[in-house]
Amino acid sequence: MGLDIAFWILAVVCVGAALAVVLLRNIFRAALFLVLCFFTVAGIYVALGADFLAGAQVLIYVGAIGVLIIFAIMLTRESRQGSPSGRLRLPALLIGLLFLVTMVFVVVGTDWSVVAEIPTEPTTSAIAQALFSGEEGFVLAFEIAAALILAAIIGAIVLVREK
Amino acid sequence: MNIYLLSPEISLLALALVVILLDLFMDRKWLLGVVSVVGLIVPAAFTVALWGTNQTAFGGALVVDQFSLFFKLFFLVVVALVILSSTDYAHKFAAFRGEYYAILLLATTGMMLMASTRELISIYVALELTGISLYVLTGFLKDDKSSEAGLKYLLLGAVASAVLLYGMALVFGLTGTTHLREIATAISAEGLLSSPALLMGIVLLVAGFGFKIAAVPFQMWVPDVYEGAPTPVTAYLSVASKAAGFAVILRVFYEALGPASLDWGMIFAVIAAITMTVGNVVAIAQSNIKRMLGYSSIAQAGYLMIGLAAASTTGSSALVFFLVCYAFTNLGAFIAIIAISNKIDSDQIADYSGMARRAPLLSLALALCLISLAGIPPTAGFMAKLYIFSAGIDSGLVWLVIIAVINTVIAAYYYLRVVRVIYLGAPLSEERVPSSGALRAALSFACLGVLALGIYPWMVLRIAEVAASMLLP
């Protein structure tokens, strides 16, 4: 019951913050609302018993990405104004709503298999097992991610350096 | 676990690192291209040596069968041709030659993994490895057009990735597993076929992968990106990236969503019809040859999707064969364009006027490839269309094949228009068009492929059948 209330509060704040990110004209405020949105998502992870995921969400999204975005806004002068209103606002709204309605229909209309109890154990070691145990885990995806980061770093250097 | 199964990817990654390290110490930068091409022999040798194995590793996440090995060899040949044809182009980003080759090789590693993974998370990460490398390569020229193209590709690619992840999340939420074969088992065991979440997951997966293969309505990035990117990268995008997309689609839809093939077969059939029609009709109006080939590649994706719509082993083997023919043809066309536009510094079709007198061999090669794209015998394009159309008819998609045949006629108009300009137009100057030996070698290889596949397709066809038979029907 308590978890239900927590979830609904977090969910409403999260959606509200996400809407504010899109709709606010001042880009700095939009960035701050993005950070709030990241925080509430971390809260939802906590409510689901995913402690490691919540920690990673706070460290990476709130800490690193949020700070990076705010820095980027402060270092670029001309970008104080957020997204200007385009002619495509109305069609975008319509398509967004259509997608929302479809998704609600899909989620409500599907017979999901639900796990009854909330995991109480700390999940860190279970995630480590899933990531790194060679035979059953996701170690291949982990290794590919290493190559992905290498490509991203080389790419960033190439694009940023003078010709 | 057998690490040898991963040897083609590991050796290719090592080659990329070697190229970067050599870049630090070597003054003669042109050698980097040589190292890259010669070094490709190692992963190619590993791939050939593995031919015939059918094993999995990493708990089923990696699968090494003839399907994945076929595509690995395919990507290695394509990247070798692209690197060879880059030698005439690399002076435009002379300071970053090493990085250029390294990122090309990293993108190829990602594509090889895309063809070889059988688990949604690994597939997604491999897809992103390819994607990030390609975004960087698109913006490599760092002029206005190239940067704009890179940014557009990045933004739209990110949206497509999000859509794809949403689809994967729905499929995972429904079946409780990310392994493709287990997804198929769960779908048929628990009677999930009529579930709206599965249908939505399929739609989102089609949208996400559709971006990679540039199917309508997910094609809006193609003209700008193809025009702005360095021409060798455009060639690479139009051939390898598209093939990797089709490899993943075949793997995911045949192995994981095979039980629902009635649903997605219909979706692909409709998208195929729209894609080929839009691609061809818009291509007619283009005056820039890179944009024209961009729209033409959209149309070709439409023909390729007939193989998906057929949802049969005949369909998938015809698709694989079509991909090989299309690769040789499109690479040949782009390599010829690299040489010509290097000299005249323009991509306008009007500036190609009378090119046959200034560069007889290059023009002949370009004309051959355009004829093959149009699907006129005795070229590879004709055989490819023949097989994919007959696969469509086998699966009862007569209406789709009729639309495709009408499209082929429309397409012949704009391909042959370029041939006419090259051969019958008045030359704008008398200067000859120079080209390097590496480029000429790559171009002759591509043209030989076009002719060989048009006259004697049986060997490649049989290999394509073996590769396709690895997938569940």
Image (cartoon, coloured by chain):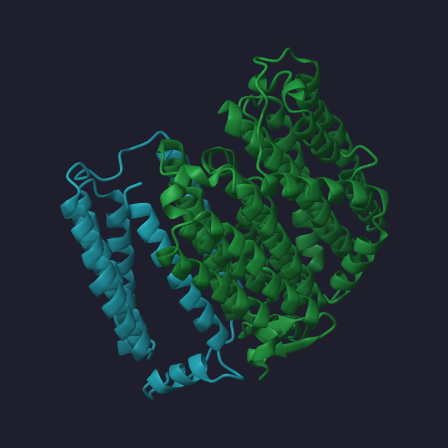
Is B113 rendered above or below residue B179? above
Q: Position of residue B209 (x, y in %)?
A: 56, 52
Q: Give the colour of chain B.
A: green
| Residue furthest to the bottom | A121
| Residue that appears at 41% across and 52% down | B99
Q: Position of residue B161 (x, y in %)?
A: 46, 54
Q: Can I make out residue B127 in this image?
A: yes
Q: Tell me the residue at 63%/23% (across/down).
A: B284
Say left or right for B46 vs A107: right
Question: Is residue B201 visible from the viewing direction of this image?
Answer: no
The hue used for chain A is cyan
Q: Is residue A79 depicted above or below A115 in this figure?
A: above
> Residue B435 lies in what quarter of the image?
top right
Q: Which quarter shows the C terminus of chain B?
A: bottom right
Q: In which quadrant is the N terminus of chain B drawn?
A: bottom right
Judge by depth and name the residue closer to the eye, A161 or B111: A161
Where in the figure is residue B388, as x and y percent of width and height?
A: 78, 46
- Residue found at x 56% / y 50%: B241
User: What percent of the width, then of the height, locates residue B153?
Assistant: 44, 43
Residue B456 higher or lower than A47, as above or below:
above
Depth order, front residue of A47/A3: A47
